[in-house]
Image (cartoon, rainbow, N blue to C red):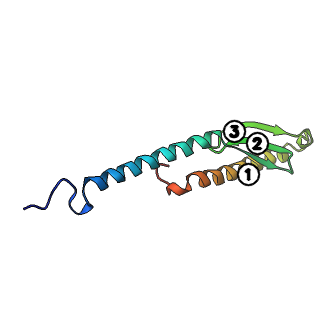
Amino acid sequence: MGGFRGGFGGFGGGNQMQNLMKQAQKMQEEMQKAQAELDETEVVGVSGGGLVKITMTAKKVVRAVEINPDAVDTEDITMLEDLIVAALNDGYKKADAVSEEKLGRFGGLGL
């Protein structure tokens, strides 16, 4: 019975397993770097032709809200509320696109 010698049988030995482990570690490090970049990357959601702008990170953390005074009509608060929702949704869509760009190559691993 001389089949098992310093490796994993049909897997080509321990050296190949070490290479796989190194590749997995490298991928994990790259994914962590990409995740950190999402914390720093900002997107701006816009609605009403620029009447409302919402700045957020690519991880969807809102950092700023900018409302043009022309968007404020005390007789029609509902319009302003709708503009805010639309700007948020625009920002979320842009954040998702950045996230997919930076993390898509990992195929959803660790997310």
Query: What amino acid is labelled 3 in the image?
Result: Val
Q: Earlier in the sequence, mark 1 or mark 2?
A: 2
Q: Nearer the viewer, residue 78 or 60?
A: 60
The residue sitting at 65% across, 45% down in the picture is 58
Q: Is residue 3 above or below residue 70?
A: below
Confirm or deny contact between disc 1 and disc 2 (CB under 8 A): yes
Residue ID for mark 1? 90
Q: Position of residue 69 (x, y in %)?
A: 91, 38
Residue ID for mark 3? 62
Q: Quadrant of residue 81?
A: top right
- Tell whether 50 sits left or right of 43: right
Q: Earlier in the sequence, mark 2 or mark 3?
A: 2
Please tell me how crowded label 1 is: few (under 14), some (14-19), or many (20+) other residues with Cα within 10 Å. some
Q: Nearer the viewer, residue 46 or 101?
A: 101
Q: Position of residue 9 (x, y in %)?
A: 20, 60
Secondary structure, mark 1, is: helix
Q: Earlier in the sequence, mark 3 or mark 1?
A: 3
Secondary structure, mark 2, is: strand
Please tell me how crowded label 3 is: few (under 14), some (14-19), or many (20+) other residues with Cα within 10 Å. some
- Tell whether 91 sits left or right of 16: right
Residue 54: give its label: 2
Confirm or deny contact between disc 3 and disc 1 (CB under 8 A): no
Q: Position of residue 12 (x, y in %)?
A: 26, 60
Q: Position of residue 1 (x, y in %)?
A: 7, 62
